[in-house]
Image (cartoon, grey):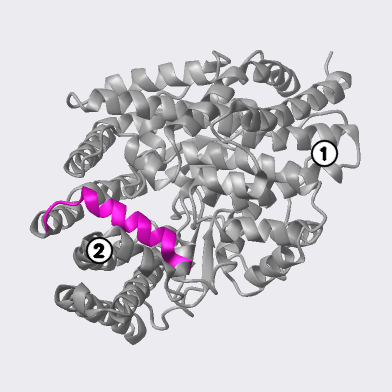
Amino acid sequence: MAYSENWNLEGIYPGGVTGEAFQTKLATIQSQIEDLTHAVASYQPTQDNDFKELINLTSLVQTLESGLKTVNTYINGLISADYTNPTYRPYDNKVQALAAAYNQPLNAYKALLAEFDDATFAKILADPALTDVAFTLNEMRHSAQRLGDASTEALLDQLRLDGIKAWSSHYDVVASTLSMPFTDEHGATKTISAGQALNMLDGYPDNQARAGLMDGYEKMWGDAQTITADTLNHLAGARLTEQKAHHYDNYLEQPLELNRMSQETLDAMWQVVDANKDMFKAYFARKAELLGLDSIGWQDQVAPLTHVGDYQPHSLSYDDAANFIVQNFGKYSQKMADFAQSAFDNHWIEAEDRPGKQPGGWMDTLPDIHESRIFLTFTGSVNDAATIAHELGHAFHSSLLTDLPVWRDDYAMNVAETASTFAEMLIADANVQQAQSDAEKVVLLDAKMTNPVAMFMNIRARFLFENKFYQERENGYVPAERLNEIMDVAQAEAFDDILDKRHPHFWSSKLHFYIDDIPFYNFPYTFGYLFSSGIYAWAQSQKDFEASYISLLRDTANMSTEELAKKHLGVDLTEPDFWQAGADLIKQDIDEFISLSDQFVK
């Protein structure tokens, strides 16, 4: 094997969590928080005629954010890779406590920005030392208007540790303890973790065994519903209380603000998604035929096709996936290819399939050392190369910003999904294009459909569920039985009644509902997918795509989403035309899938 399936975390802080490097870093961050607290408290705007002191404060704030981000990524990596090990939880709590302590001088810094009159603030933004972060400074000045007094904000920060953050962490603990029996198509039974079960649901080839897996998975999370419902209710309750304290008019205002996008843009996107869901009926009807099923259940929506013509499924090796990614990235951008090669060579990716790992996958940055780490589980399925490419796209995005101030790497989640989904599209299309037969092409087109099915239907169901849940949570506790009802209705609507078996405990099983720092952790994925579709089409007509693409990515934390699209793509995101163009691309794939597969059904 040329590439390791295990990442290198030791090089970040030699000696681990008890080592001198990590302990010194925590002490340094604590000292910097104290320095910032003192500096902000003693700052006199009227005596800072050349803004040098403000520039120094701004630099210290970004240095602190870089350090906190780095230690947080490191701890999260340790926990994700060894999910059932309690060793790292106390250190995670320490990092979260430092982040809470940092919020107090940060809020004071934001408040002092609001003290400047408009004319003076305009001069501040024009200073050459601050022009690269002018957009962020404007955002901070605006957000200061939502803040309460210093003592109230300090209390809220401390309450978060045993409030919303604690409930999010509690969910991780619950998930790490769950397991279930699984019986394969040969009658062999073994016990698997919740994370392993989720990975298998997305790719297990045998219909009967997969259906049994779904039944067991639903039961496992159903058995935990009392605890998960309590967790979700308290997490959402804490969030609603914080939003009210910070003068948000409704529960969607904060996630929209965090994603730097308008309600009009969100509405336009969902309008197009809802208007085009009917096109998936023909796709799923044909998929059921090819799977040898009468209908499609939740467990079948992304199930691999294994018996199409004379096609023989094969397992993809990690080395082959890595080489395929590097090769096909290079067809669009040599910089993307070189970056991916470096990530594989330098062991930035944790991909081993083993028990005890956290479900799902992620990428996060280590800004102190200008590196990233990627977490996923490689199973050898046809979709795995695209999954790795997705996370590498995230990491490539961040790598383009290392010469800019730290705040320029603070792009919102919706545009964060742009580079990742674009990279995933490149690999999915490359898979289809290199097919050696019609049968193989049908299989690969089906694999490519995994993304649009998720973005148009699964993510849509999540949004419908959360929207209804938060409406009801504002009026009181929502019991597990009602959560099941809300989810079932949301899935029926989003999937246009295509599924004969739904997953009512999806609210219980899905990690994304329990993430504390980004509310409504769902619609940004659909945004990123469709935004990337537009970029992918745009890429075909660009003479110098690489330069244009990099220019767009470098602006992602420097303007609103609507401004970004207007400047670099010349489109209006509040109108349906842009979103419909992405839906039309999906329809083309569905039509080709059905046309090519006609020969393989009776």
Using the image as rendered, state which of residue 600 and residue 444 is in the foreground. Answer: 444
Question: Where is the N terminus found, in terms of image quarters?
Answer: bottom right
Secondary-structure class at tag 1: loop
Earlier sequence position, callout 2 versus callout 1? 2
Question: Where is the C terminus found, in terms of image quarters?
Answer: top right
- Mark in front: 2 vs 1: 2
Which amino acid is tagged 1?
Gln
Q: Is residue 383 magenta?
A: no
Residue at the image point whose x is 91% and y is 37% from the top: 437
| Highlighted magenta segment, given as a residue range | 132-149
Q: Quadrant of residue 295?
A: top right
Residue at the image point whose x is 79% and y is 51% from the top: 542
Q: Main secondary structure of the magenta part?
A: helix
Dot 2: within a 10 Å radius of its alpha carbon, few (fewer than 14), some, or many (20 or more) residues?
Answer: some
- Position of 339 with respect to 82 (left or right) is right
Residue at the image point whose x is 32% and y is 80% from the top: 50
Spot occupied by residue 418 in the image (x, y as percentages of width and height): 59, 48
Q: CA distance from mark 2 to mark 1?
A: 68 Å
Spot occupied by residue 235 in the image (x, y as percentages of width and height): 24, 41
Spot occupied by residue 381 in the image (x, y as percentages of width and height): 68, 45
Q: What residue sits right under mark 1 in the picture?
A: 312
